[in-house]
Amino acid sequence: MAPDDDFDVEAWNRRLDETPGEPLAGQRATDGADPYLVGLDPRADPRLGTEATTEQGFPAFVHGQWTVEGEIERFGAFGRGAARAQGWRRTVACLLVALLVLPIALVAVQLVARILG
């Protein structure tokens, strides 16, 4: 007789279902557990919610367009788009990135020349 033959799956599942869902007084729900896994069904399909999705068009931005963070976020998205493009689109995108960075580089060179000169 193998050691796993006497394992009662139904009793184990009943025990899981009877486990209290609320934490005990003075105990946090995430004590000793991964906070991302709290409340998940241990018998659920592990692949659930892992579907890859693709979207066409502009990415969703977090910051407002006219904030410094928003400008940085959009420049980064533009640069990532240029890195992913192929053929003539990549050439055009890299040229536009260079044109966006050129004024910043010129001002930086001018500032260094004033400081050293």
Image (tube, helix red, strand yellow):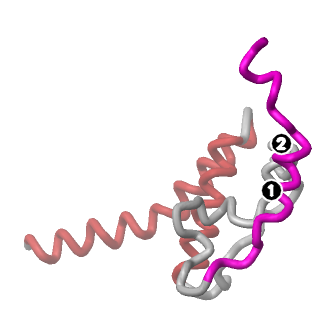
Frontmost of labels 1 and 2 is 1
Within 10 Å of the Cα at label 2, are there few (<14), some (14-19), or many (20+) other Cα atoms? few
Q: Quadrant of the N terminus?
A: top right
Quarter of the figure that contains the C terminus: bottom left
Q: Nearer the viewer, residue 62 or 88?
A: 62
Amino acid type, label 2: Arg
Q: Is residue 117 above or below residue 16?
A: below
Q: Read off the residue under disc 1.
A: 16
The residue at the point 75 percent across, 14 percent down is 2
- CA–CA distance between discs 1 and 2? 21 Å
24, above or below 100, in the image: below
How many numbered badges does the structure rendering display? 2
Does any portion of residue 78 appear in the rendered image?
Answer: yes
Quadrant in the rendering for residue 4: top right
In the figure, residue 27 lies in which quadrant? bottom right
Q: Which corner quadrant of the image does residue 88 belong to?
A: top right
Q: Which residues are magenta?
A: 1-24
**Membership of 13 in magenta stretch:** yes
Q: Relative to 79, is 69 above or below?
A: below
Point out residue 87 in the picture as x, y percentages from the top left corner.
73, 33
Q: Nearer the viewer, residue 62 or 92?
A: 62
Amino acid bearing label 1? Leu
Mark found first going from the N terminus, 1 or 2: 1
Contact, CB < 8 Å: mark 1 with mark 2? no
Residue nearest the observer in this picture, 58 or 26: 26
Q: Where is mark 2, residue-wise?
A: 47
Task: Determine whether, in the image, residue 33 is placed left or right of residue 114.
Answer: right
The residue most toward the top is 1
Task: Please tell me which residue lies in front, 79 or 109.
Answer: 79
Residue 37, percent from left and from top: 68, 59
